[in-house]
Image (cartoon, helix red, strand yellow):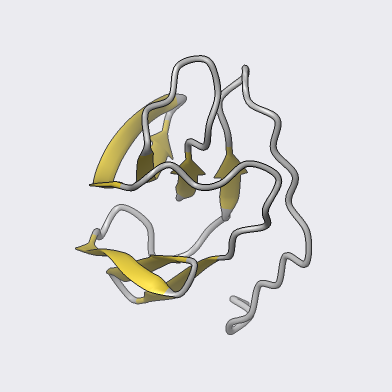
Amino acid sequence: MSLETLLPGPRVQKVFRLYTLVNGKRSTIASARVTEPSLGAWHSIRVVAHGPKIQAYLNGTLLLDHSDKTFADGWLGLWAKADSVTEFADLEVTGTVVK
């Protein structure tokens, strides 16, 4: 599962998306249009996944509420377009360790 937020840049798309990546093929599973965030400011992203239900928040606002059964467990990825300047800080992942 990958979360994308496209912030200001030469080709602003103003979207907040969830993707799956299966066998090297990326597919959008949920998407929301957003207003252009301010440059130079930090923004918070929160993703909550319980079973197939995935909720994604931008700056405390729920924007994506989706169910997807592609993965029961696995990896988390953060992604930004190649022409964007993006920094991630204070990444915290919590959950149950799969044995």
Q: Residue furthest bottom?
A: 96
In which quadrant of the rendered view does residue 82 lie?
A: top right
Residue occupying image coordinates x 63% and y 80%: 94
Q: In this view, does 13 lie above or below 50?
A: above
Depicted 37 relative to depicted 52: above or below: above
Q: Where is residue 40 in the image (x, y as percent from the top left)?
A: 71, 45
Q: Is residue 33 left or right of residue 58?
A: left
- Residue found 78% across the figure and 67% down from its top: 90
Front position in the image: 69 or 62: 62
On screen, residue 76 versus residue 3, left or right, reads: right
Image location of residue 95, percent across then percent down: 59, 82
The structure residue drawn at horizontal position 41% and vertical position 67%, both measured from the top left corner, is 57
Query: Which residue appears at 72% of the width and 65% of the height?
Result: 91
97 lies above or below 66? below
Between 24 and 10, the one nearer to me in the picture = 10
* Residue 87 x/y as whole percent: 75, 44
Position of 72 compared to 94: left or right? left
Q: In the image, residue 45 lies at what x, y percent?
A: 54, 63
